[in-house]
Amino acid sequence: MESSAIQSAIESILFAMGNSVSIEKLAEVLEVSQSEIEDALDAMTVRYEQPECGVQLVRLEDNVQLCTKTENYEYLIKITKAKPKFSLSDTVLETLSIIAYKQPVTRIEIEKIRGVSCEHAVNKLLEYDLIKEFGRLDAPGKPILFGTTENFLRCFGVTSISDLPQVTPDQVEEYKKEAEAEINVKLDI
């Protein structure tokens, strides 16, 4: 199968599916190697980077998806009269950060880190499809394990959890000092 035919088939599949498709599945369906799929995806990425193209190829872990370029989002909102993207409160964002870095994690573990209930934040994150249930912990009560979704990767512009910024030991110490100073200020009131 020629590269142009592979690209055409991939484009059709991704357009029709709407959601992401694994590279492995594309290779299986098109009966070509994964390296041929990768080569076709690289060529498509270059083609979609042209200013006249309104779509882009987004990689999410070992999956790919055809998406609208972000610079055209405002026009989509106007045409569909859709509400703008949701915004995350500090509480919800903090809960999401804990889940992203500690996944899979239970609600109890999140609450232990935050020091307060996180039921509302977890429910909002589930509603926004930023997290999902990853099963249950083999412990008394069988608590639900949470982890991030492909939508999380898409929304935060990363291709994998390993792309998230890492906190250095110096930053941890700085954050501890800031937290202690904040606690001391609150105690002085």
Image (tube, rainbow, N blue to C red):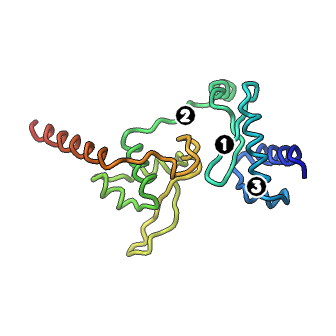
Q: Of all residues shown, which one is farthest toward the left? A: 188
Considering the numbered disc 1 on the image, is that residue within a helix, a strand or a loop? strand
Q: Earlier in the sequence, mark 1 or mark 3?
A: 3
Please tell me how crowded label 2 is: few (under 14), some (14-19), or many (20+) other residues with Cα within 10 Å: few
Measured as percent of width and height from the top left, residue 63 is found at: 67, 52
* Circle on res. 35: 3
Measured as percent of width and height from the top left, residue 43 is found at: 77, 41
Residue occupied by mark 1: 58
Residue at 72% x, 39% y: name it: 45
Residue at 89% x, 46% y: name it: 5
Q: Which amino acid does label 3 sit on?
A: Ser
Which of these two is toward me, 69 or 45?
45
Measured as percent of width and height from the top left, residue 77 is found at: 63, 27
Q: Which of marks 2 and 1 is nearer the N terminus?
A: 1
* Circle on res. 85: 2
| Number of marks | 3
